[in-house]
Amino acid sequence: MLKCLHEIALCFKGVCVRLTIRFIVALLSCLPINAHLLHGQTAAVTPPITDDLDRESLRQAISRSLAYLAKLPPDRIVGEQPRRFTVKEIADSLGAFDQLLDLWSCWTCLVEEFNARFEVVPSSSDGQRRDVLFTGYYQPVIDGSLVETGEYRYPIYSKPADLMSVEQVTLTPAIKVDRIIGRVDDEQFMPYYTRYEIDEMGVLRGRGFEIAWVKDPIELFFLHIQGSGILRLTDGRQVYIGYAGQNGRPYRSIGRLLIDRGKIPKHEMSMQRLRHYLSEYPEERNEIMAHNESYVFFRINQDGPLGSLEVPLTAGRSIATDSRLFPKGALALIYTESPVLNGAGQLLGWRPFVRFVLNQDTGGAIRGFQRADLYMGTGDEAGARAGYMNSPGKIYFLTLK
């Protein structure tokens, strides 16, 4: 077991060939069979208990989850999958794990104590839904202005006053409550405006919802994808902007659109490749971006980036998942692969890793059991890694036995 972990650690220090299935099989073959029943089904063998980052960032992320949970009633349900979790269960597990980190310098001691006290629960009781696609996101830094000028003419909007959220109740075949977003027009509830209507038709322009302006519409589009950012003003100041709301329209991938149209080969697709295409073909840009009808509204924050739990995200430690499913603020163990880049931001290969993370965010494109987004940090370097991140892996949630 320890020999296998040592070999994996050596692999982490280099660039590994991207053979995901072989990596997973090799990883799990290091372990004794440790299956248990989960809702009547046999759980998968768990990965090795290890971590490729530092203790301080993990403790910081844990403290931020605990700050969120401290504001909630102990018996509140904060997640339905892979089973129901209460605030107290998640908070108690985080507190106990934080104490366990005192053993960081003796990793075998930490693992022994962890195995005695913690349960490792696969993200789904259905084995067919345990494979997770990991992507990456980051906090961009873009040039902006708090006043409109000839150069800075593309607006960043705050949440409009006429944006409404209501509950829609379906009685058959079973009672179901959905939250839908829209607006009232002539006493009728209507879907909210699309990206095309907002950006191209200007339906919100001049109504007082603008909070800032940028000079590059491509940067603005990707700011919407990331959900938060830093505006670098002309006087040198920096302003944090964060997610305030969304128009209720479904997220639609422009990357998938360009693949389907034969514009970009699937194996070449990345955020960097998308940016290059939009810059190279400005005559196609507006039509392509309008394909994604989802539109994000922002607010000015004192700190950032803030996740959906309203606590700051921690680079490498915070993940975004489907908030309808998984426990908010919970500790998890992930294993997947991250891109290895050269100094010019070009992809060299892939590095497998195992890491403790906290479930602290969500996103419009992150839906279902098989999607997760890893927060990479701030700036161009983090953006380069996030742009290439597109790797299969697993998520295990950790709770006290």
Image: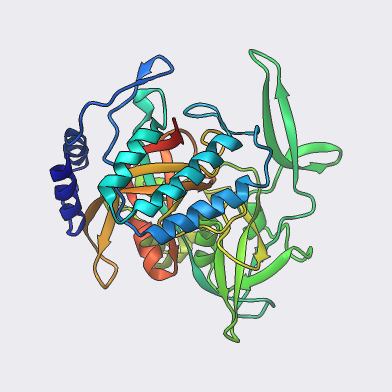
Q: Relative to the observer, which residue lies in front, 304 or 177? A: 304
Q: Is residue 166 left or right of residue 216?
A: right
Q: Position of residue 240 (x, y in %)?
A: 60, 69
Measuring 40% from the left and 47% from the top, which residue is drawn there?
100
Q: Is residue 162 left or right of residue 290?
A: right
Q: Is residue 296 above or below residue 300?
A: above
Q: Relative to the observer, which residue lies in front, 7 or 263? A: 7
Measuring 67% from the left and 14% from the top, which residue is drawn there?
172
Q: Is residue 118 left or right of residue 61?
A: left
Measuring 17% from the left and 43% from the top, which residue is drawn there?
2
Quadrant, the C terminus: top left
Q: Relative to the observer, which residue lies in front, 113 or 213? A: 113
Q: Relative to the observer, which residue lies in front, 339 or 309? A: 309
Seen from this angle, which residue lies furthest bottom? 235
Measuring 35% from the left and 47% from the top, which residue is drawn there?
259
Q: Is residue 142 left or right of residue 171?
A: left
Asked which quadrant contains residue 204, the reply is bottom right
Q: Position of residue 43 (x, y in %)?
A: 34, 24
